[in-house]
Amino acid sequence: MNLFRHSIRLVVREPRRTLAALVGVTIASSLVMSVLLFGTASGATVTRRALADLPVDAQVVLGPGVDSGGALATIAVDPAVRTVSAFDLAHFDSASTNTAGTATQTSVGVLIGVDPTYSATTGLFPLSSGTLAPGEVAISRDLASNLGAVPGDSIAFVLPGGGSVTLRASGIVSLVGADLVLGPIDAAHRAAGANAPVNVALMSQADLASHVLPKIPATATAADPSTSGGGASGGASPVFAADPAVRRELHVQLRHAQLPGDPVAAQAWLDTVRRRVEKQGAGNLQWVDDASASLEPLAKDLAWGQILFIFLALPGIFLALALSRLAADATADATRRHAALLRARGATRRQLRNVFMIATVLTALVGSVLGVAIGAAVGLALFGAELASAGLADALLRASASSIVLTTTLATLASILPLRMQLQEEIAAGRQELQRNRAPLWQRLYLDVLALIAGAVVYFLAGGSGIHPVLNAEGNPTVTLALTSFIAPLLLWSGGTLLLLRLIGASLRRSGRLTRTLGRLLGPGGELAGRSVTARAAAASRAIVVLALAVSFATSVLVFDATYRQQQIIDAQLTLGADIKAVPNGAATTATVAHLTGPGVAAATPFVDRVVYVGPEAQDLLAIDTATLPGVAPLADSFFQGSTAAGAIDALKARPDAILVSSETAKDYSIVPGDRIRIRVPDATGNLKTVDFTMAGIALEFPTAPKDAFLVANQSYVAAQTGNDSISFVLARAEGDVGPASTALAHRLGDGWQISDLGTTTARLANSITSVDLSALVLLDISFAVIIAAVGVALFLLAGLAERRREFATLVAIGAEPRQVRASMLGETLFIGVAGIATGLLTGTLVGITLLQILAGVFDPPAEVPAIPFALMGAMTGVIVLALGAALLVADRGLSRLSVVAALRER
Amino acid sequence: MTIISCRDLTRRYVQRGIDPVVAVDSVDLEVDAGSFVAIEGPSGSGKTTLLGLLAGLEMPDNGSVTVLGHDLARLSGAERARLRQRRVGIVFQSFGLIASLRVGDNVALPLALAGVPEVERQTRSRVVLEEVGLGRAFDARIDELSGGERQRVGVARALVIEPALILADEPTGSLDEENAAGVLKLLAEAVRRRGATLVLVTHDPSSASLADHHYRMHDGRLTAGVLA
């Protein structure tokens, strides 16, 4: 007997059976394929987003005596290079002004010399006010504030080595986005999170070369930034090698279109460019690869991301494969018929099994390939552009191979059990009948209850584990993911599934009420439906469970996504401080706030953020107006330790000198509420003045300061004690949509203010895997859930039709009208639909909430309550109801083609 | 009074790649009210197809069928269903019982489809089950019954609507000789008591011998038969 030929014949000659078996595998394969492609596309998105924020891709540090012009010309001709700009940096030890007989001095900073096109090329150092005149400098807002300097004032800079230079300030320059180029370039400083200098003076490269550089000895070094103004954030400062007093650099922007989408491949490409340029420099050029450093953590982040994406889609993949079971039910008659035919031709039991096994593998393989084609089409339609940048052919090839191997294997395994049962039925019907009456092994072992208990235990034990951001060796943020966070939802999902199966099966077997209810609703057809569902309790409960899990899968993804988006906004609110933040380019006082309220702005509050010293440690002092801040900035109870938000604000209101400190500060200095704290705060002249505060509580988070060490005090008290009532910025709450309100405010305030809002902040904060827009994945998962639900119910109805051909034929023969037969099917669909959707919505919400554990560490603060997207869940339910309607139509079409006389003849 | 009237009744089955099969070929048939007509013929002779045409379950390619005064071609599918529901009882060779329903519910099914209230359904079902000797099996499951008992339930279901016409398709085909004789006798007596008409198709000459009128069917053609 040629087994392969008979297997092919089985596949070809039983098209209904083959088609039904193909459906589940094809859906599973296309889901796997499209999710893998989503992962690849998100890799390209993350890579592009990571590099888009970089003002320069590389800083090429010139060795002593190297001709800047010559090096620039050499680098500019490299095919990977888009722009090269000269950038020189000289440290100064202090800066001072003497206005109207009052001398003001500030600490360390840097003088920057750039060529005239630098700002236009990189977008860095735009002028906020004034000009950059030859022989003069544009100073940063902080330098201006610290010195009380305005354009027109002269500033004396003391240079390393003892020299000095006096330059006139002609404008104010913005430092937004310039931390990377201003900060240290060595890995050790960067890893320690060393801050970039804020006292900055910008001038032309030629002026720096002629007025400043000759006055700095070649051996001079910069003052240690960690002890004199540019200090590392938090904790004791490590000891670093001193920075040279002068850095001469070329800033390079690369052609990003040439970059592969995959971060690892992109890093390899960047490394090739680095080696090529450094080789040409013969040891005098040091390539500081900012782009590669940004990409470094992405590869690992993306691996976690892929696990997360696959995990979110995993229930869908399993469900699609579970359709194989329903398909086997729907075509059991064809299986038995063909088995009988082969037996009649002399096939042995083993041969019979092998023929069906080969046919199963063939069908799984064909289904996988079909699914790959559909998944590829879906992937290309949804994120073709990102895939193209990630290397389309390679991405398709890898995803196809993985999908085919995975789904062929899983589909074969999923089909073996029902196939064995059907063949055993054929071979030993009596014994099978006996086995059928026994509860399945998992029910006898109570695996469902055990899985639920284990899931609950893991959930509570692993609370808070999940994805966590950490700094890598280069100081770039990356994430770690506790795999335990996947275990709880997995156990709860599988335990819930089995428990559902047990409960529905048990309740169906004793449900006279169902028959009566459907009878009242739909007449005799409904009554029949109730009895039929009861009689086919096992198959009906499988269909209900497939539908419930499909709905549950879609619901959990929706809850996860909604909470993810909610936390993105809360994260942005916390970072920004409120809906809108307005930063004055010049000096501003609390009185300015009155000008900000108006159309689009419901309320505003002044905010002071000043660097102060608690002992030797620099911290941010946030001085707030307790009367107006709570109405503008979001304050959650979780921000405060041992108190509520209202309680903390009340504590500040209770005494003018009250101060909230971080838990680290409270622990390091062993202070408790009521203790006095002495803090050095800069006064109006920039000099540090010791001010006494009374500890009033512990703040873990606060608007504008999501992660750093900080203190919160009363603004009026700080102003009175330091004689400095200038504010850092104003926070505002939008009236209605944030975007238009922000635009209106920017228009009203004019050029003297920089306005940022939630929308821009959300985009800026999004990096690594949190920059991935989950909407495409959600759309994919929901679409597949709807398809699975519809196919699951259609297969149940078709299986019922196949099993009950003679029953339907009998009904028609004894006078059932077509509408009554339809009512019978409608009744079954109605019952399965209501039971499946209701339990699915409930369990999906619960699983969605447990999934949030994965995100516990991604967002700061973590989600306190999940977002339940009722409108989306309603829409999804509506689509599933429509899909069930379509399944009913398919079954009805099968019914209308039923030949009554032929069916009655069947034995 | 004529209960069934067929003129030039023809039904062909067309299958791709195979010559059309004429299952019923130009059949003319008149059946009077209250009579017992047997149509005898070997397997594949077209008997069941003819019965399907008389029941309005299939439509002819040629010719006409009038049943109980209704030209079936002029009735919609729902109207034909209602005609069967209220006036035509059908007995099947393989019983045609619905396994998920209890015995009483199976018998009451045509009444349920006709919208008869439940109390009346129960009463009428019990009465007819008593008539066929299964009064105590009202709440029994179908799989608890023997073959002969199942067919009695089938007969009861056909009788419960008090039909004017009963179409029986090999009602004894699945039964042993003893049960077959019992069921047939029961059916014939019940029909006679009601003054109804019985059309029986069978391959068994002995079953056919009980009929008032006897026809033979061969290759789709109907000829008047001779009682054995």
Image (cartoon, coloured by chain):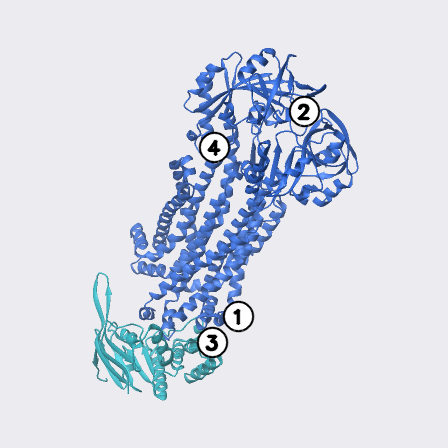
Query: Are circles 3 and 1 on residues that touch, CB within 8 Å?
Result: no
Q: Secondary structure at mark 3?
A: loop
Seen at 60% across and 47% down, the residue is A458
What amino acid type is highlighted by mark number 1? Arg
Mark 2 / mark 4, whichever is N-terminal = 2
Look at discs 2 and 3 and give the one toward the viewer: 2
Q: CA distance from mark 3 to mark 4?
A: 71 Å
Q: Position of residue A322 (x, y in %)?
A: 45, 54
Q: Nearer the viewer, residue A189 or A206?
A: A206
Chain ID, mark 2? A
The colour of chain A is blue
Q: Secondary structure at mark 1?
A: helix
The residue wearing badge 2 is A148
Chain ID, mark 1? A
In the figure, is residue A631 to the left or right of A764? right
What amino acid type is highlighted by mark number 2? Gly
Q: Nearer the viewer, residue A443 or A682?
A: A682
